[in-house]
């Protein structure tokens, strides 16, 4: 399986953690690429018209995107249970995945505004609005902590990857200090072996 890859993408990380959980990580072939919202990479676009990572090309040549689809595919290939089959646990897992993906969407928009857009035309109110979205997501995860349970599913995985990205790119938020209940319930999940892994492109 070929994975168009960026080691600092939280969406790629979702895929890598899922592959590790399913015992499929050694089957991934990392493809070097440079996803960017302005300078788009033709190598990715050849398989994914959105030009985004992650993009996975299966052994049969099928291109899959985005992270939600790829994670579900890997879970099915590995016979896993990251996606509960039915009932309240399924909807909780999918809702947390959507909430954490939304947090990541906001964080990436801030990152692009601060790093891809020329300084003279950056929009402070836009950044503030996205940062507020991040905080409202964190507040909701803080509030819902009582619903965390012992299993590990796509909801826990995505929340963990979103918080990993905040640690990476927004350490000044100090989310653990401001959202102690969230820090308490998510920490055991973030300490799983799959969540503590780091990945890089193989050296030539």
Image (cartoon, grey):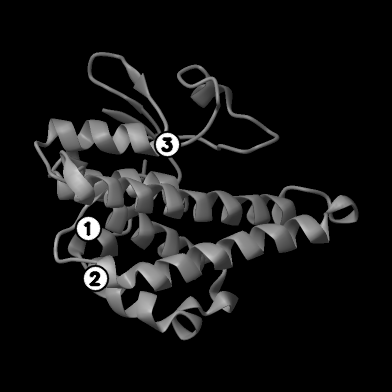
Alpha carbon distance from label 2 to label 3? 23 Å
Front residue of 63 and 85: 85
Name the residue: 40% across, 44% down. Answer: 12
The answer to whether residue 190 shows anywhere in this view is no
Alpha carbon distance from label 1 to label 2? 8 Å
Front residue of 136 and 80: 136
SS category of the residue bearing label 3: loop
Badge 2 or badge 3: first in the primary sequence: 3
Q: State whether residue 85 is above or below residue 186.
A: above
SS category of the residue bearing label 1: helix
Q: Quadrant of residue 183?
A: bottom left
Residue 1 placement (x, y as % from top left):
26, 28
Residues at marks 1 and 2 touching, judged by CB atoms closer than 8 Å:
no
> Considering the image in quadrants, where does the C terminus appear?
top left
On residue 191, the disc is: 2
Residue 89 placement (x, y as % from top left):
20, 51
Q: State whether residue 149 is above or below residue 185.
A: above
Name the residue: 70% across, 35% down. Answer: 38
Residues at marks 1 and 3 touching, judged by CB atoms closer than 8 Å:
no
- In the figure, is residue 6 to the left or right of 42? left
Alpha carbon distance from label 1 to label 3? 18 Å
Residue 148 placement (x, y as % from top left):
25, 66
Q: State whether residue 68 is above or below residue 142.
A: above
Front residue of 52 and 29: 52
Q: Quadrant of residue 81?
A: top left
- In the figure, is residue 29 to the left or right of 9? left
Q: Quadrant of residue 172?
A: bottom right
Q: Which residue is mark 1?
A: 194
Q: Which residue is mark 3?
A: 54
Residues at marks 2 and 3 touching, judged by CB atoms closer than 8 Å:
no
Name the residue: 68% across, 33% down. Answer: 39
């Amino acid at each position: 399986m070929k994975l168009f890859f960026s080691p600092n993408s939280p969406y790629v990380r979702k895929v890598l953690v899922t592959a590790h959980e399913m015992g499929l990580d050694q089957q991934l072939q990392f493809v070097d690429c440079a996803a960017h919202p302005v300078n788009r990479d033709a190598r990715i676009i050849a398989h994914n018209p959105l030009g985004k990572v992650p993009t996975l090309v299966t052994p049969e040549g099928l291109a899959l995107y985005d992270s939600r689809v790829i994670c579900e595919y890997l879970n099915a290939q590995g016979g896993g249970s990251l996606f509960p089959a039915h009932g309240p646990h399924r909807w909780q897992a999918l809702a947390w995945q959507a909430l954490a993906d939304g947090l990541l969407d906001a964080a990436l928009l801030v990152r692009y505004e601060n790093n891809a857009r020329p300084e003279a035309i950056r929009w402070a109110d836009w950044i503030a609005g996205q940062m507020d979205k991040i905080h409202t997501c964190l507040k909701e995860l803080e509030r819902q902590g009582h619903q965390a349970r012992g299993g590990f599913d796509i909801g826990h995985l995505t929340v963990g990857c979103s918080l990993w990205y905040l640690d990476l790119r927004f350490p000044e938020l100090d989310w653990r200090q401001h959202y102690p209940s969230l820090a308490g319930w998510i920490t055991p999940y973030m300490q799983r072996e799959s969540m503590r892994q780091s990945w890089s492109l193989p050296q030539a």
